[in-house]
Image (cartoon, grey):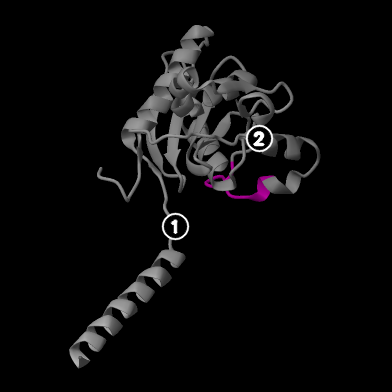
Amino acid sequence: MKSLIKATMIVLALAATSLVTNAQVSEKKTLTLDGANKVIAAAIAYAKKKNAPGGVIAVVDDGGNLMALERLDGTFAAGANISIGKARTAVLFKRPTKVFEDIVKNGRTAMVALPDSLFTPLQGGIPIMVDGQIVGGVGVSGAASAQQDEELAIAGANAFTSSASSSNGMEMKTTPASNVLCEGTGQRLVCQGRRIARRQRSQLHDPHQPA
């Protein structure tokens, strides 16, 4: 009888520990190299479709670390570092970089005092979001204009929903005012760069699923 009581207490203690541990951690999706390359491929496809004269596309993880970069022929050399800076700014500040360019342009010049390693307030950086989580950022530099830089970046960031849109009726577009991603159907349209994805994707690794 004593052994049974002891065993029951051990089981309860382990269950309580498990509950506490689960309350202290959360699931997190991470961008893989295949996923980063998919973002770049989508941006390049859009660049070719729009006859962009060049462009450097950089993809960083959710910590702002470079994962992949590709420079189209004819793009100026400085575009590489600029695109990385845009992608890093977008993911670290969780906002499209056009937001910060507009802030500085509207008079808050003190923001340029932030270190270059963390802050590149130039249009063309977009966070990559899946299931409401930021998994990385994409930055583009060297296209025909700052506007086209951002269009290429949005096309790359849309890589994880473009294939799903044809099968689940999801609508994707950019708004003229903010040029950020909008998705959804009818009254469920969601803007401001937020991403909605309803299914697991092979380019995103869930730590609780086999790699």
Q: Position of residue 51 (x, y in %)?
A: 52, 7
Residue 10 among magenta residues: no
Question: What is the magenta segment's predominant secondary structure?
Answer: loop
- Reading the image, the residue beneath label 2 is 192
- Quadrant of the image containing the N terminus: bottom left
Q: Position of residue 95 (x, y in %)?
A: 62, 40
In the rendered image, which quarter is residue 25 located in? Answer: bottom left
Of residues 153 and 80, the one nearer the viewer is 153
- Quadrant of the image containing the C terminus: top left
In the rendered image, which quarter is residue 65 located in? Answer: top left
Name the amino acid, label 2.
Gln
- Which tag is nearer the camera, tag 2 or tag 1? 1
Q: Are marks 2 and 1 in contact (CB under 8 Å)?
A: no
Q: Is residue 112 above or below residue 20?
A: above
SS category of the residue bearing label 1: loop
The reply to whether residue 77 is visible in this rendering is no
SS category of the residue bearing label 2: loop
- Reading the image, the residue beneath label 1 is 26
Residue furthest to the front in view is: 1
Name the amino acid, label 1.
Ser
Of residues 84 and 61, the one nearer the viewer is 61
For the magenta stretch, what is the residue range? 112-119
